[in-house]
Image (cartoon, rainbow, N blue to C red):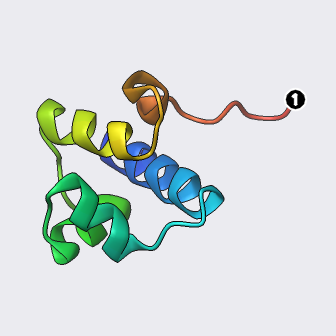
Amino acid sequence: MRLTEIFGANVRRVRKARGMTLETLATEAGLAYSYMGGIERGQKNPSLNVAEKIAKVLESDPATLFCAPLKAE
């Protein structure tokens, strides 16, 4: 899995856990809805500044959004 896909999947997981819509996340981060959707699908490569904005809105540590989930042994 590529880093953009990991980041997007983690953003989607945290957003849903917080009960937030994609539109709300995009608006609060100051991003276009379509761009935010592309990030969540792993199709867009956000800059570090954008990743930081998203993490702030999600009240999450930016570094954790880039971490792949641990595989069960």
| Whether residue 2 is visible | no
Q: Secondary structure at mark 1?
A: loop
Please identify the quarter of the rendering in which residue 36 is found.
bottom left
Quadrant where the image shows the C terminus? top right
Residue 53: in sight, yes or no? yes
Quadrant holding the N terminus: top left
Q: Position of residue 62 (x, y in %)?
A: 38, 28
Number of residues whose C-alpha sits closer than 10 Å to that of mark 1, classed few (under 14), some (14–19) or many (20 or more): few
65 up-or-down from 24: above or below: above
Residue extending farthest to the right is 73
Q: How many marks?
A: 1
Which residue occupies 35% across, 70% down? 24
What percent of the width, then of the height, locates residue 19? Answer: 60, 66
List the residue tagged with mark 1: 73
Q: Could you say which is closer to the camera, residue 72 or residue 14?
A: 14
Q: Is residue 8 left or right of residue 67?
A: left
Name the foreground residue: 1 vs 70: 70
Drawn side of residue 31 relative to residue 12, left or right: left
The picture places residue 70, in percent across and down from the top left corner, at 69, 30
- Residue at 49% across / 27% down in the picture? 64
Please tell me which residue is depicted at 46% across the width and 37% down the height of the picture.
Answer: 59
At label 1, the amino acid type is Glu
Residue 52 as seen in the image, left or right of residue 30: right
Q: Is residue 6 above or below residue 29?
A: above
Find residue 50 and report its horizontal and vertical position in percent.
17, 42
- View extreme (front): residue: 28
Q: Is residue 72 above or below residue 36?
A: above
Residue 7 position by quadrant: top left
Observer-nearest residue: 51 or 45? 51
Task: Looking at the picture, tell me which residue is in the foreground, 59 or 63.
Answer: 59
